Image: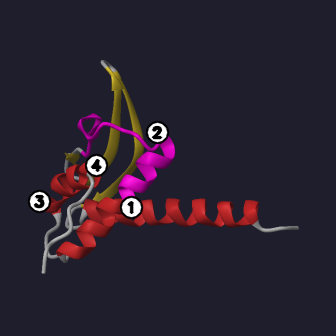
Amino acid sequence: MAVPTLDPLHQRIYNYINPCRGNIPENVISTIAGNISFVIRHVHGPIINPDRVSIPVVDIGNRGHRAAVVVHKEELNSAVVVEARVNWGENAIVALGKKVDRMINELLDLSQALCTPQ
């Protein structure tokens, strides 16, 4: 069976987060990457250069980890789309995925409310 080709933004995000996945199944990481792509396009429009997207995952001293989705607009001008912080031993990518899921659910609820006849 052929593996489907991911769009370039989805692939870039997947490539960023896959090394941090720990024991998370690969299909879950692909879903998280797709959901992050959706949120980026919702916030910054449907056409975005994947090279403008970064996902830094950093240690926060002895407190834990922080992961963020960042869109680089121009030199010295970046926008954080979403971020998550976790304690040591927790997976920042999982937390980021959960936060993105909540954002998408809110967007879908709002869209449904706006499209439902009163």
Q: Earlier in the sequence, mark 4 or mark 2?
A: 4
Relative height, residue 70 to residue 91 (above, below): above
Discs 2, 3 touching: Cβ within 8 Å: no
Of the numbered discs in the image, which one, if any, rests on residue 68? none
Q: Nearer the viewer, residue 66 or 98?
A: 98
Q: Amino acid at mark 1?
A: Asn
Residue at figure coordinates x 45%, y 44% from the top left: 46
Pick out the residue farthest to the bottom. Answer: 1
Q: Earlier in the sequence, mark 1 or mark 4?
A: 4
The overriding secondary structure of the stretch rendered in magenta is: helix
Residue neighbourhood size for the residue with mark 1, other residues' Cα within 10 Å, grouped as few (<14), some (14–19), many (≥20): some
Q: Position of residue 41 (x, y in %)?
A: 44, 47
In this view, the residue farthest toward the right is: 118
Instruction: Look at label 4 and name its amino acid.
Output: Leu
Q: Is residue 49 magenta?
A: yes
Q: Which residue is mark 4?
A: 9
Q: Residue at x 36, y 53 (%)?
A: 37
State if disc 4 and disc 3 touch (CB < 8 Å).
no
Q: Which residues are magenta?
A: 35-55
Question: What amino acid type should be assigned to the residue bearing mark 3?
Answer: Pro
Mark-to-mark CA distance, 4 and 2: 13 Å
Query: Which quadrant of the view contains residue 53?
Result: top left
Which residue is tagged 3?
19
Q: Secondary structure at mark 3?
A: helix
